[in-house]
Image: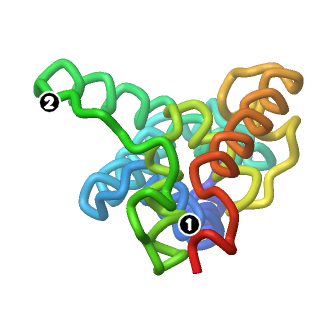
Amino acid sequence: MTIAEYNRAVDDWADALYRYTLKNLGHAMSAQDIVQDCYEKLWIHRDQVDPLKVKSWLFTTAHHTMVDNIRKRKNETLVESKKLPDRAEEQGYSDLQELMHQAIDRLTEVQKSVLLLRDYEGYSYREIGEITGLSEAQVKVYIYRARIFLKDYIGTIDALL
């Protein structure tokens, strides 16, 4: 990979990579750190990375870095367990965007990652499988389960309004 190809990778994929990590982590500084780490690793491994596959390489690296960071955070802090409401309509929400963000935050890390890659970033099932290391069938199952959870959590629109 040449310097020009590296710079093109930064121009082409930095924003999408940031959006993906921000949606998963919900914290801007952590998302920026992960994007920076990914590009640092790309620079270090620039001789081994095929310029035609740089997008997949970056998202795969970001995914694995996020998983590592999440595991570290879980080991460092103890979170009080509390009962979560079964449905959003029990909480009396009226802001649908806020409700959707809260519902997505309640997904497992794998479900959240594959759903965001599919619905927010527009990746194919095959590309998501390459990024996450899952098979195409596993990706479909996780997305299906995530959507079922979101549907059950949010409930009906009529109940919310």
The residue lying toward the viewer, choosing from 59 and 97, is 97
Where is residue 121? Give x, y as percent.
70, 61
Q: Is residue 142 left or right of residue 95?
A: right
Where is residue 18? Give x, y as percent.
47, 62
The reply to whether residue 54 is visible in this rendering is: no
At label 2, the amino acid type is Glu
Looking at the figure, which quarter contains the C terminus? bottom right
Residue drawn at x 59%, y 41% is 113
Tell me if residue 15 comes above or below residue 24 in the rendering. below
The residue lying toward the viewer, choosing from 54 and 136, is 136
Q: Which residue is mark 2?
A: 80
Q: Is residue 148 left or right of residue 109?
A: right
Residue drawn at x 57%, y 49% is 153
Q: Which residue is mark 1?
A: 7
The residue lying toward the viewer, choosing from 34 and 93, is 93
The reply to whether callout 1 and callout 2 are in contact (CB within 8 Å) is no
Q: Is residue 44 left or right of residue 113?
A: left
> Dot 2: within a 10 Å radius of its alpha carbon, few (fewer than 14), some, or many (20 or more) residues?
few
The residue lying toward the viewer, choosing from 127 and 46, is 127
Where is residue 111? Give x, y as percent.
62, 35
Q: Earlier in the sequence, mark 1 or mark 2?
A: 1
Whole-angstrom CA distance, mark 1 to mark 2, is 44 Å
Residue drawn at x 11%, y 27% is 77
Residue drawn at x 31%, y 23% is 71
At label 1, the amino acid type is Asn
